């Protein structure tokens, strides 16, 4: 079997360095490949995926976990929608472990976890709400997300732990669109737990034709 050649960013149709803490969205066409690069290492990248033309058909973590029989995402994982159809497929992953259960930080969760003085802090849910509004969506359209590069092991007692990330600077994941999809990202602003090494950093977003 012939090994695939590495993708060359110089041939990409889209290539941007996206700042820490900020929201991002982009339509990725069927067959295109989206690469998300953790430039600094140990940066959580909260991600939502929707059918580009039917936002009610969106990434579903339950469908995805059941189909893969795995709570973590890595090479070969298909990301399924609420209708049970694949939205994107992970075709390359240099980390090997991405979270499906930890959810997105919010003003409310920051208050519960870290104290009332943290409620005002920038958070992923607000980022998603901003991106959703730009696409004609509302807060009800924000559902369970993927946490790319985030390390959330399940402890022996069944509790989820948010611990130091395992992604190195330059780690990446490649997602191939199985149909036209809307990808929304919050480049997580969290500084109260280890998911970003307490220091949010930029990411790089690259899109190639198939």
Image (tube, rainbow, N blue to C red):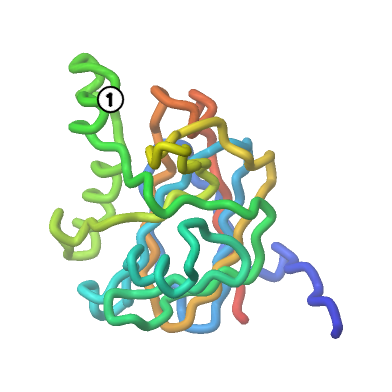
Q: Quadrant of residue 116?
A: top left
Crowding at dot 1, Cα within 10 Å, few <14 / some 14-19 / many 20+, comes out as: few
Residue 136 position, x and y percent, is: 17, 65
Q: Which residue is mark 1?
A: 113
Task: Identify the residue shown where x is 33% and y is 46%.
Answer: 103
Q: Quadrant of residue 134?
A: bottom left
Check the picture and name the quadrant holding the C terminus. Answer: bottom right
Q: Is residue 13 visible?
A: no
Check the picture and name the quadrant holding the N terminus. Answer: bottom right
Q: Is residue 34 visible?
A: yes
Count of residue discs = 1
Task: Identify the residue shown where x is 62% and y is 66%.
Answer: 75
151 w.r.t. 27: above or below: above
Residue 50 position, x and y percent, is: 32, 70
Q: Quadrant of residue 113?
A: top left
Left or right of residue 159, residue 57 in this image: left
Residue 112 position, x and y percent, is: 21, 26
Task: Identify the residue shown where x is 48% and y is 68%.
Answer: 69
172 w.r.t. 167: above or below: below
Residue 205 position, x and y percent, is: 55, 56
Task: Identify the residue shown where x is 18% and y is 32%.
Answer: 108
């Amino acid at each position: 079997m012939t090994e695939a050649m590495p993708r060359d960013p110089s041939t990409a149709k889209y290539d941007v360095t996206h700042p820490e803490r900020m929201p991002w969205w982009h339509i990725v066409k069927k067959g295109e490949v989206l690469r998300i690069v953790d430039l600094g290492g140990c940066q959580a990248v909260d991600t939502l995926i929707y059918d580009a033309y039917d936002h009610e058909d969106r990434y579903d973590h339950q469908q995805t976990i059941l189909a893969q029989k795995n709570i973590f995402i890595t090479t070969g994982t298909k990301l399924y929608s609420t209708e049970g159809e694949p939205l994107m497929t992970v075709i390359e992953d240099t980390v090997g472990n991405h979270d499906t259960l930890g959810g997105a930080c919010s003003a409310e969760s920051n208050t519960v976890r870290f104290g009332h003085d943290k409620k005002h802090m920038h958070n992923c849910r607000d980022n998603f709400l901003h991106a959703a509004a730009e696409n004609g969506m509302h807060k009800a359209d924000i559902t369970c997300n993927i946490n790319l590069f985030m390390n959330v092991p399940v402890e022996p007692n069944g509790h989820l732990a948010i611990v130091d990330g395992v992604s190195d600077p330059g780690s990446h994941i490649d997602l191939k669109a199985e149909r036209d999809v809307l990808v929304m990202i919050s480049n997580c602003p969290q500084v109260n737990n280890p998911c970003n090494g307490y220091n949010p950093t930029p990411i790089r977003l690259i899109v190639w034709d198939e």
